[in-house]
Amino acid sequence: MNAARDAGLISIEKQIRQAIRDAVNRNSRKPLYWGGLAGYQQLRAIDQAMHQVTSTGIESHYLHCLRQRVERVLTRNRTLASELQEAHHWLERIASCLRYPPSAFQVGISPETGKRELVSAQQVVQDMEILLQQFQPLPKRHRVQTRLRNALQKRWRLYGQELLYCYAIPGLPPDNLQIESLFGCLRRHQRRISGRKSTVELRTFGQVQVLFVADSEQALLKQIQSAGLGDYLTERRRLAQAEVPGQFLRRLHHNPFDTVQTLLKQHSARCFEMDNSSHPAFIKDNVLHTC
């Protein structure tokens, strides 16, 4: 029983360590989004949750060591994170000038024509020029903001005119993310069928993929019903186990504080069980019941 509980503690500590590693190595390809800043905020939420560990027993020694390392990383990167936060604020202002993403901005209805009022390319150019005049960071004190400002000015000068077509042509999207997502789904589907190259999705869900060949719906239903209930339940359990790591990361990214706090509560409960199981009265009662 103690060995099983020790394994449970190790599993919980492994998940906490995974949450910390995910925060440190977190990145993103989303436009106007900084993975490093999101990782720092996630690590700060983990630190707040780990400060609630008050136990001084030997079972919590590893958690205290992790907390010290997390505090050291936060202290070392606090100034850079503050600068990144300010740079991200300017990124949000840039997105506001470009009205990106379009779903975040309400489109009004013209009272005269009754049609949707679309932002004009001239208005976007005017807003961007005003922002460039206001965005004047000090090169020696604000290095990240300076690099952002230089990159914005260069790209606006080179590609600004190409960005304005989506405001002049109704229905033209400002990015190609949807079509890239469609091509990605088609590419992964083709890889599953041909088997030429493995993907993460194939490794995760490959154990439950089945190809049916039937001339009618009745024949297809007969083939599906031929699968045994035990085999079906076994595959469902394997699928659930394969989805656990992804579900944990999604919960962690959505609410890191509550996720780590739940793990710490489980850790505390297991430590309490181990302390009770090693108590002499518990051992004596166990011996009386087993004799």
Image (spheres, rainbow, N blue to C red):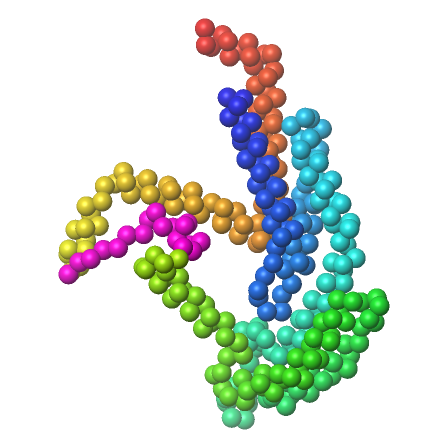
Name the foreground residue: 28 vs 45.
28
Indicate whether residue 210 is drawn in magenta: yes
Does the image show residue 217? Answer: yes
* Horizontal relation, residue 242 to residue 134: left or right: left
User: Which residue corresponds to the image point at 53% horizontal and 23% vertical from the top-left?
Assistant: 3
User: Which residue corresponds to the image point at 49% horizontal and 83% vertical from the top-left?
Assistant: 172
Does the image show residue 118? Answer: no
User: Which residue corresponds to the image point at 69% horizontal and 26% vertical from the top-left?
Assistant: 57
Position in image of residue 64 (x %, y %): 70, 35
User: Which residue corresponds to the image point at 62% horizontal and 83% vertical from the top-left?
Assistant: 159
Magenta part of the protein: which range?
Answer: 198-215
Indicate whether residue 155 is drawn in magenta: no
Q: Residue furthest top?
A: 291
Position in image of residue 183 (x %, y %): 42, 69
* Horizontal relation, residue 271 to residue 51: left or right: left
Q: The C terminus lies in which quarter of the figure?
A: top left
Position in image of residue 169 (x %, y %): 51, 88
For residue 276, above or below residue 116? above
